[in-house]
Image (cartoon, rainbow, N blue to C red):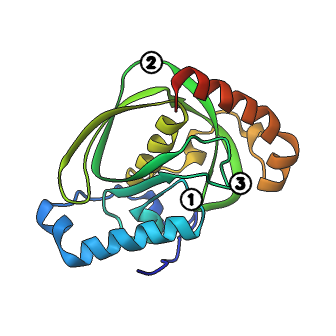
Amino acid sequence: MAVLPIVTLGNPVLRERSREVTREELLSPPMQAFIDDLVETMVHANGAGLAAPQVANPVRICAIWVKDNPRYPYKPNWPLTILVNPVLTPLSAEEFVNYEGCLSVPNLRGEVKRFAELRVEAWDRQGNALSYEVRGLTAGTFQHECDHLDGKVFLDRVFDTTSLATWAEFEKHKLEGFAARARSIVQRWGS
């Protein structure tokens, strides 16, 4: 496994719609090795998720894994999940306000609105069909990563630019308030 370079805002690959992956391609040794590298890169960077375009590979694959993440201490744990060709469908119009950051937009955070409940349909890394529901902060993480597959970054969804903050200023001025809000989201939605 290898830690891959993470591309940052301004790299054109972050603005492309990624292409779907065939089962044959997914099961190939090079693609399986790439998925291992994607996970290794996410873990190395303390990310809650990482999408293939963030490492300059415009395919519809992303990884999500939250396990006592120091960057996001308020996020509930979620097992390592690989999504291939994911489709997210909101289960209601209800939204919550999430304070997001991104490994491809270093040192910046801002508030975005995310659907509170989603149906997730995708393949796992072996090409098996997945279909389940996610809620709350976990639903926000899924939306953030899947946005990358459509050429979007969280900045495209920031609804109030006065919420933008560097990591240091977020921790000084906004973390406590958002952590309280995050706890209430977790209490309500369970994840």
Q: What residue does disc 3 label?
A: 108
The crowd level at tag 1 (other Cα within 10 Å; few <14, some 14-19, many 20+) is many
Q: Earlier in the sequence, mark 3 or mark 1?
A: 1
Q: Nearer the viewer, residue 14 or 28?
A: 28
Q: Quarter of the image holding residue 159?
A: top right
- Assign the N terminus to one quadrant of the image: bottom left
Where disc 3 sits, the SS reads strand
> Residue 103 appears at what percent x and percent y?
59, 61
Q: What residue does disc 1 label?
A: 47
Residue furthest left as drawn: 24
Left or right position of 19 against 183: left
Mark 2–mark 1 Cα distance, whole angstroms, equals 28 Å
The numbered disc on residue 84 is none
Residue occupying image coordinates x 77% and y 54%: 167
- Residue type, numbered disc 2: Ala
- Residue type, numbered disc 1: Gly
Q: Nearer the viewer, mark 2 or mark 1?
A: 1
Left or right position of 160 against 121: right
Q: Where is 143 relative to 34, above or below?
A: above
Q: Are marks 3 and 2 in contact (CB under 8 Å)?
A: no
Residue occupying image coordinates x 53% and y 45%: 77
Q: Earlier in the sequence, mark 3 or mark 2?
A: 2
Q: Nearer the viewer, residue 155 or 118?
A: 118
Q: Where is 79 relative to 51, above or below?
A: above
Q: Where is 85 relative to 21, above or below?
A: above
Q: What residue does disc 2 label?
A: 93
Left or right position of 136 against 183: left
Q: Earlier in the sequence, mark 2 or mark 1?
A: 1
